[in-house]
Image (cartoon, rainbow, N blue to C red):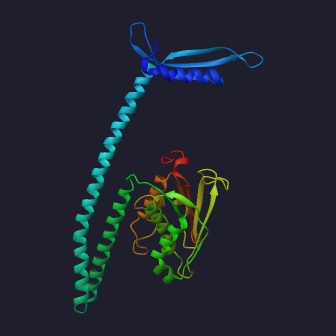
Amino acid sequence: MLHPEDYERTLEVWQECLATGKTYEIEYRMKRFDGEYRWFLARALPLRDDNGKILKWFGTCTDIHDQKMLNDILEQKVAERTQELEASNNELLQFASVASHDLKEPLRKIHMFSNLMKDRYLDKLDKGASDYMERIIGSSARMTKLINDLLTFTRLSVVTTPEYVDLNDVIEEVLSDLELVVTEKGAVIEIDDLPKAEVVTGQMRQVFQNIISNALKFSKKDEKPHVRITSEIIESCSFDAEKSKDGSFVRITIADNGIGFDNFYAEKIFTIFQRLHSREKYDGTGIGLAITRKIIEKHNGLIRASSKEGEGASFSIILPLRQNVVLELSEQ
């Protein structure tokens, strides 16, 4: 009655259950009276005597053919839809790349010729014209940065392979890039010993750079910036998880003594283009923290911010040490 392709597999499972006494469960195809093979789910439990000896097996055999076929159709549809999305995503990335190049080219010329006019003819311009020229240069520079940030945001949907790296090295590279502003502001950066983790190095570098840059940018005028980076190994992917030296996750906290913000906006700051301060007061595109959250979610991690106006801000990041030990949390 069994389908020829299912015979050996079914026999192996049955013999294993006879030898071990564990519950018998398998899906196979059996021939119906009209010759059609249909999928069945077989389950059986061993019935034992007082000494634990198996006397017989009691079980059921349920026709699951319709459900099985439906599942196969759904899996096929999902696979087709995934291929369509991947193709669409590749087209979007190509468009973003071409569009950014075409947009940046005229901006480069605006920026370049505006600077030339400023340098060569600044003395001949009145104060109003000079101010307009500065605005043109500043606007073109902001537009270029906005295009670059948008392109970075769209590229995060590309599948990338993580590497097992020392997070201390990543932080060192970030601080090297920020050395000038750190020196200018007289900032103090304290860093705990960070663990190794399986991450996409370039993306994680961007996470740390975005958060530390913000700490330096939103510092108090009358107080030197102080950034404290701590870490601890925890047992689960939760902000309230207990510390555990054998845990599979790391909780990284980046705290500063800056101007802070109303904690009401703790979630809104991760929204693209969301700004809590005017562009005239603090420059930026409002995309940095949106990129940061997207990167952390791609790493199957979590991020949140907490703050109080005038009392600094704190960012908590949870990352898996190894990507293969994590449940799918990207939708959380």
Which residue is at 41% across, 54% downward? 160
Left or right, 89 with reference to 301: left
Quarter where residue 233 is shown: bottom right
Left or right, 322 with reference to 126: right
Query: Residue 243: in sight, yes or no?
Result: no
The spot of residue 247 in percent (x, y) is: 64, 53
* Viewer-side residue, 152 vs 146: 152
Left or right, 209 with reference to 312: left
* Viewer-side residue, 239 vs 204: 204
Compared with 166, 41 (above or below) is: above
Residue positioned most to the bottom: 123
The spot of residue 131 in percent (x, y) is: 30, 83
Left or right, 166 with reference to 36: right
The spot of residue 138 in percent (x, y) is: 32, 76
Which residue is at 36% across, 64% downward? 149
Compared with 282, 329 (above or below) is: above
The spot of residue 184 in percent (x, y) is: 49, 83
Compared with 149, 51 (above or below) is: above
* Viewer-side residue, 328 vs 284: 328
Quarter where residue 283 is shown: bottom left
Which residue is at 46% across, 53% downward? 298
